[in-house]
Amino acid sequence: MEIRVGHSPDPDDAFMYWALTTDFVDRRGFVFEQVLADIQTLNQWARAARLEVTAISLAAYPFVQEDYALLPHGASIGTGYGPIVVGREPASIDDLRGREIVVPGTMTTAYLTLRLALGDMPVRELPFELIPDEVASGRADYGLLIHEGQLTFGDIGLHKVLDLGEWWLLETGLPLPLGVNVARRDIERLGDLSEVLAEGIRCGLEHRDEALEYALQFGRGIDEAVADRFIEMYVNELTEDYGDEGRSAVAELMRRGEAIGAFPNPVQLDFV
């Protein structure tokens, strides 16, 4: 059975799927094709149920919950760190209120969390990889960074104004779930598929050096040290399994999103 797996062209996502390209994992008759796209595109594709398995922003899940169920693994969850708002000069959170912020997509969890922290604000969407230069060049005063931009913004002279992972931890005491993996509900042997994908993540963590070498192909030119650090941040024990803490964090973020009217319908959390 062919399974198309959508994920971002990022080291952490590639790291999770390395084992499926090897003989270390019994694929149980599944044939995997990796489909690469930025997270905003994956969110949009999921609304059309295009792929059998895909990474999406947690904030996009309420829009696709009729077609997809949450896999109990593969999530990008950080404790005390997350997407970062940056500017050219030092500033405070109060300086951000009412100011335009360039964001990587309005269906991203980063944007939802920003709304929870600041309320509604003027935003402009731009592909995530263009946002650092948009701010550094002066075309935007502030930008919301995801992916490896969370680690490299200082290299071009930008300043951290707000770390949404820090804000969320202080606000809730919970880690911040950002990206999640979902599987289409119409897949036969969905339980078997979930177990194969989970085994792939465990295998990558057990063979870290080999998985890292593979993941570096997807680093968009970032150096090995940054890729290694990024993988360490977002492929962890909560990636293997949400556990009670991870599931509580998901439920709390969805509850708060519902409270501000971010979703079209009530959220029904459903894990494979």
Image (spheres, grey):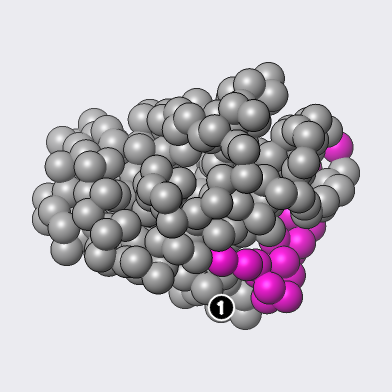
Q: For the stretch drawn in magenta, what is the main secondary structure?
A: helix
Residue flagged by tag 1: what amino acid is it? Leu
Is 215 drawn above or below residue 230 in the view shown?
above
Instruction: Please say whether residue 202 is one of the residues in the magenta stretch.
Output: no
How crowded pointer 1 is (Cα within 10 Å; few <14, some 14-19, many 20+) is rated as: few
Residue in the picture at 34% in, 66% down: 207
Magenta region: which residues?
240-265
Looking at the picture, tell me which residue is in the foreground, 67 or 191: 191
Looking at the picture, how far across and down is residue 225, in whole percent? 17, 63
The quarter holding residue 229 reads bottom left
Q: Position of residue 174 (x, y in %)?
A: 62, 75
Q: Name the side, left or right, on which 211 lies relative to 205.
A: left
Q: Quadrant of residue 82?
A: bottom left
Given residues 190 and 42, the one toward you in this image is 190
In depth, the one of 90 and 53 nearer the eye is 53
Membership of 260 in magenta stretch = yes
Where the N terminus falls, by quadrant? top right
Q: Nearer the viewer, residue 37 or 71?
A: 71
Question: Number of numbered discs present?
Answer: 1
Query: What residue sits right under mark 1 in the picture?
Result: 170
- Residue 204 spot, x, y in % from top left: 41, 61
Q: Label 1: state its secondary structure.
A: helix
Figure check: 44 above or below 18: above
Looking at the image, is 134 positioned above or below residue 22? Answer: above
Residue sitting at 40 percent across and 70 percent down? 206
- Across and down, in percent, residue 80 comes to 47, 74
